[in-house]
Amino acid sequence: MQFLHADGRLIKNEEGREVLLQGYGLGNWMVQEGFLFGSCEFMAGGMRPFMRQEGMDGGRSIDQTIIECCGRSYASSFWKKFYENYFGEEDVKDLAGRGVNSVRIPLNARVLLEEEPGIQWNEDGFAALTKVVDLCETYGLYTILDLHAAAGGQSAIGCDDGWDNQPHLFTDEESWERTIVLWEELARRFKDRASVAGYELLNEPLSLPVTDPLLPRLAEFYEECISRIRKIDRRHIIFLQGHRFASRADIFLNPVYIPAKSAAAGLTAPGEWVDPECGNWVLTYHMYETLPDLGSLGHIFAESGELNVPVWMGETGGSSEYMTVLYEMLREMHIGVNVWCHKGEESSDAAWLCSFKMPKEFDLIRKYAREGGPKPSYEHAIRIFDEYLENIRFENCEKHGGRTCAILRKAPLPTDSAEREERVLTIPATGYDLLPGRDLTKEGDGEGSFFGREQYASFTGYRREDHMRVVCEPDFVPYESAAFAWTGGRAPKYGDWPHLELALDEGEYASYTLRQIETDTELILTLRTKAAAELEIGIRNATLHLSVPCTNGKLKEVCAGTVPAGTDTSVRIRCASGGVTLREICFRR
């Protein structure tokens, strides 16, 4: 494997070829979260200010519960087995076989650096990390080392595994220094590993608005930490996040946040103070369940251009339909994605690829830790946690491999009877290609990715700049976002978007790209018409002609033909006569 580096707005390898990092994060591996572990609901109290961890809501309280129920000796052995079983060779092998190329590894400072006076490395923690890096390298996967839980905590929310939901990294000198010393040690140990794509210095720093006054300290931390890492390692990429759940880039763009040392050195242009020695850094964003639209992405593209650095969507997730639309938009703009996360408890709300069942009697542990119920005996509790360790092994998990088809825009393969592999890749019709953009010719006979004659911006607010007619499905009443919330209603995650369809009149078209088709694949259109229509389906150099009967406004599946095996295949759907409303574009085995 080759070292990666930032080159303008692209990530490239040593041969100068672009590498788009696409993969999964190891949520719940070294940094446990209660909802992924299966011990409590999502962010149970995790955003309450100054709140000590409560029963099994995160790594610290989960560890304490195991100690209380099973004893310290068992707790120590439990975590060694947990790291091995949660993400082992079979997990890595499966990921590599599905076509992803990277794994983001969330690190926990307290697992690598003992919370004791002085600097005492936990070699068991480093051994677990090194084993994962080795396995990923063996199967050709890059790794990104992500400090998810810095010494003292950096986010002011529960997912940083801090003591009390306070960002002590920026207020306590000891936490500051211990975090930088940890990064120096990581750099020493991994500086010669080309399979490590880079170092992500902090995860979601200063996530809540109340912590905004500490933004100058965040910039100063990055300045000092990068400077000290570069004395050891000048080859690896530095991945950097802004504040507000990694959704803002203010500290890199606004001159007010330029650290004093850099300002005195004359580094005053946007982002110039970041890694001035090597200029080898990537801006990282996180995005969940926002509208997959330029309205959500435009500022990211603009900021990447202003800073002239690559962007990586380092944490994201959602429904398969959401991911296949958003990630293709990002891919077209040379932005890779990392899905949160690879594995989780079966009822957790995450875009996991593998899910595991909880032990049958785990409620006894949960009720003891969270409700003050009776404590099981040591022997009984050990049996429950031993069952947990078995359940999380890859071979005992339920697989949801169809999600990688959505993420990578990859046509589905035949399913293994032991796996719930989706046989259909479904692209919402409104998720047509972003680039090269609207066909600007008068009759739609150019090389654009879409063409429509809608005179006004889409009233739905989705892709409103495209002049395509996006409509609501029949009988659906729009939520109208703010007004709906104001009246006491609560719109679902994606608002109106799941209920939108694309209407094409004569001469109008939309294109959809598949990135990988390993075997010939059937193309199915889900559509509705009010009268008979004719469609032209362009696939590579061939054009298929399809007569669509009147469906009386009801949805109907129509087989449009076969898409042959290949890579980066664009399917253009053009209305030759009449009119048609498209709901979904499906690729089926």
Image (cartoon, helix red, strand yellow):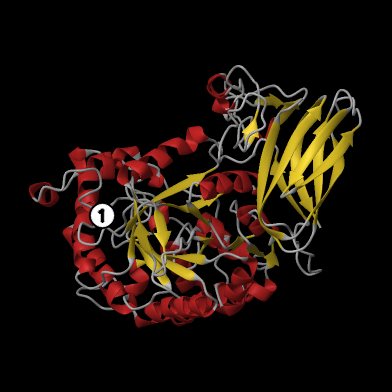
**Which is nearer the eye, 322 or 458?**
458
Which residue is at a point 38% across and 49% down the rendered structure image? 157
For badge 1, the amino acid type reads His
Query: Is 210 placed above or below 138 here?
Result: above
- On screen, residue 406 above or below 62: above
Residue 147, percent from left and from top:
36, 62
Residue at position x 48%, y 76% in the image? 132
> Measured along the vertical axis of the image, is residue 67 above or below residue 552?
below
Q: Residue furthest left?
A: 264
Q: How crowded is mark 1: few (under 14 residues within 10 Å), some or many (20 or more)?
A: many
Quadrant in the picture for residue 502: top right
Q: Residue at x 72, y 47 (%)?
A: 426
Q: In this view, does 571 lie to the left or right of 155?
A: right
Image coordinates of residue 282 in percent, x first then y, are 36, 55
| x and y, in percent, of residue 567 in the image | 66, 58
Residue that appears at 74% across and 59% down: 412
Which residue occupies the foreground of this view, 49 or 365?
49
Residue 328 can be seen in this image: yes
Q: Which residue occupies the foreground of this view, 417 or 347?
A: 417
The secondary element bearing badge 1 is classed as helix
- Which quarter of the rendered picture does the C terminus lie within? bottom right
Residue 542 placement, left or right of 20: right
Residue 48 visible in the shown view: no
Quarter that holds the N terminus? bottom left
Q: Which residue extends farthest top?
A: 455
Q: Mark 1 points at which residue?
A: 168
Relative image position of residue 47 (x, y in whole percent): 41, 45
